[in-house]
Image (cartoon, rainbow, N blue to C red):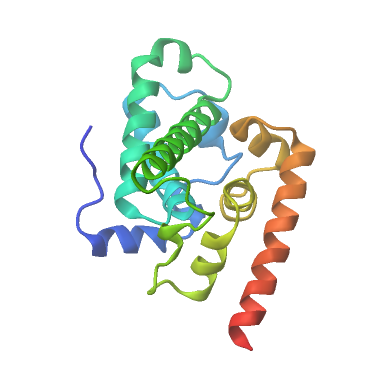
Amino acid sequence: MASTTGGSGAFMDRMHEPASAVSEPGSSARSSAPASFEEFFRDEHPRLLRALYLVTGNRQEAEEVMQDAFLAVWERWDRVGAMDEPTGYLYRTAMNRHRSALRRTARAARRVVGAAEGGDAFAQADERDAVARALGALPRRQRSAVVLTELLGYGSEEAGEILGVKGVTVRALASQGRAAMRARLEDDDG
C-alpha cells in the first residue's frame, strides 16, 4: 500500500489541519459502518497518520505502522467491516504494531550493545517544538492516552478499548501525562 502523503510540505500541511476538517470522533461518518475498505481508508487515513506521528515522533515510522495496520485490516475486511467500530480495531492494530516494533528494536539494541541503562536515543530530537518534546518525553502509555483523549477527542472508554485497558486507566494515564508535560514545559520556560 503506497503512501498518499506526498512531500514533507504536504504532510506538514495535513498535520496542521484541524481535526474537524478530517472527521470528528462520534461524527456521522464514524457512526455508520463504511461501505467499502476504500471508503474506510479514505476516511481514517489522515487521522491515523497524525495520531501515529504524535506517538512515534517520526513521519516514516508513522507511515510504516499505518500501512501495516491498514494491510492487516484489509486482509480481514470481511470481518472488520462488519464490526460496530472498525476504527477502534484499526487503531488497536496500529498501536499493537507500534509496540511490537519497539520491542524488536529494544531486543536488537540489547544484542548489539548489551543491556543498556534506560536511555531512549530517539528522544534526542533537537528541532522539535516544546510541546512535541514534552509529549515525546512521556512514557509510551501516557503518550498514547494523551494523544487519543486530548488530540483525537476519544472518550476514555473508547481510548481504553483501543489501548486494551480500562477507561479509568486511560484517565489516570492521561492525567499523569498532562502533569508531566506541564512540568516539563515550565522547566523549559524557566
As rendered, which of 56 and 48 lies closer to the eye? 56
Most extreme residue toward the bottom is 190
Specify the quadrant of the image occupied by residue 71: top left
Residue 147, horizontal then vertical, whole percent: 57, 52
> Is 46 drawn above or below residue 87 in the view shown?
below
Outermost residue, top direction? Answer: 78
Q: In this view, does 174 lie to the left or right of 52?
A: right
| Position of residue 155 measured from the top left corner of the image (x, y, whole percent) | 69, 42
Q: In which quarter of the image is the N terminus?
A: top left
The reply to whether residue 36 is visible in this rendering is no
Q: Where is residue 69 in the image (x, y as percent from the top left)?
A: 39, 30
Residue 3 seen in the current view:
yes
Query: Would residue 175 appear left or right of 31 to someone viewing this image?
Result: right
Q: Is residue 83 above or below residue 150?
A: above
How many marks do you count on the picture? 0
Q: Is residue 66 left or right of residue 32?
A: left
Residue at screen point 55% across, 36% down: 28
Instruction: Name the residue located 70 percent from the left edge and 52 percent from the top edge.
Output: 174
